[in-house]
Image (cartoon, rainbow, N blue to C red):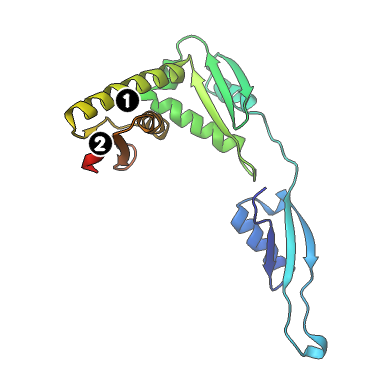
Amino acid sequence: MPKNDIFEGDSVDEAIEKAVEELNIPKENIDVEILEQPSKGLLGIGGSKGAKIKVVQKDDEGKPPKVIVEELLALMEIPATVESEDLEDSFSIDVSGDNLGMLIGRHGHTLDSFQYLVNIIANKNKLERKRVIVDIEGYRKQKTGEIKAMAERIVGKVLVRQKSITLRPMNAYERKLVHTVVGDYSGVSSTSSGEDPERKVVISPNDNK
């Protein structure tokens, strides 16, 4: 639940509208506790007070991420086995089967889009959101290892040459991996430049910052 679960307005209805707009969830998905009714000063004398409410989201677990992925694959008529693991800060979904390359796409772009769709559905109308990480045929795990190894090689080159090196365009997940690797070394730093989908990581020697 967000910290700001108490809302005020000139009336109860206005306070509810503010809550719905700020939390971005339908009115029917919240329970409202009225903390203070709007009131005017005695005999119209003195300052008036607005309404104050507390908003609590209704218990709506929705479908588990595993079921969402299975239903999406069924709609696309793609036979596959789906396994899931509920981690502390995310859900891990592993999809396995035959001929799933079409779901990965070039440089994993299709997989990223599929994962984005799953996250939108899984976290719809939820105040407390949990990221869903989808992997297909171990592609993401393999890619993670390749990117980390590549980042380490580039860091070595930057330290030797003392010149910045710009990497190929990467998605947000890949860029984060590179930044994490660079953060383990002294003498180098990394920044991101450009706009998606052409956003790139630049690794530079600290003296050139």
Closest to the observer: 173 or 197? 173
Q: Secondary structure at mark 1?
A: helix
The answer to which quarter of the image holds residue 179 is top left
Q: Residue at x 73, y 81 (%)?
A: 48
Query: How many numbered marks appear?
Result: 2
Residue 143 appears at what percent x and percent y? 40, 19
Give the crowd class for mark 2: few <14, some 14-19, many >=20 residues within 10 Å.
many
Numbered badge on residue 187: none
Residue 89 appears at what percent x and percent y? 60, 32
Residue 149 vertical placement versus 123 (above, below): above
Q: Amino acid at mark 1?
A: Ala
Closest to the observer: 173 or 9? 173
Measured Cα–Cα span from mark 1 to mark 2: 12 Å
Q: Residue at x 40, y 18 (%)?
A: 145
Q: Residue at x 39, y 24 (%)?
A: 108
CB under 8 Å between discs 1 and 2: no
Q: Amino acid at mark 2?
A: Ser
Residue 116 vertical placement versus 3 (above, below): above
Residue 68 appears at what percent x and percent y? 61, 27
Residue 124 appears at what percent x and percent y? 61, 41
Closest to the observer: 26 or 107? 107
Residue 205 vertical placement versus 133 (above, below): below
What residue is pinned by disc 2?
204
Numbered badge on residue 151: 1
Give the crowd class for mark 1: few <14, some 14-19, many >=20 residues within 10 Å.
many
Closest to the observer: 127 or 181? 181
Quarter the C terminus occupies:
top left
Q: Residue furthest top?
A: 98
Q: Secondary structure at mark 2?
A: strand
The answer to which quarter of the image holds residue 51 is bottom right
Q: Residue at x 61, y 40 (%)?
A: 129
The tag earlier along the polypeptide, 1 or 2, is: 1
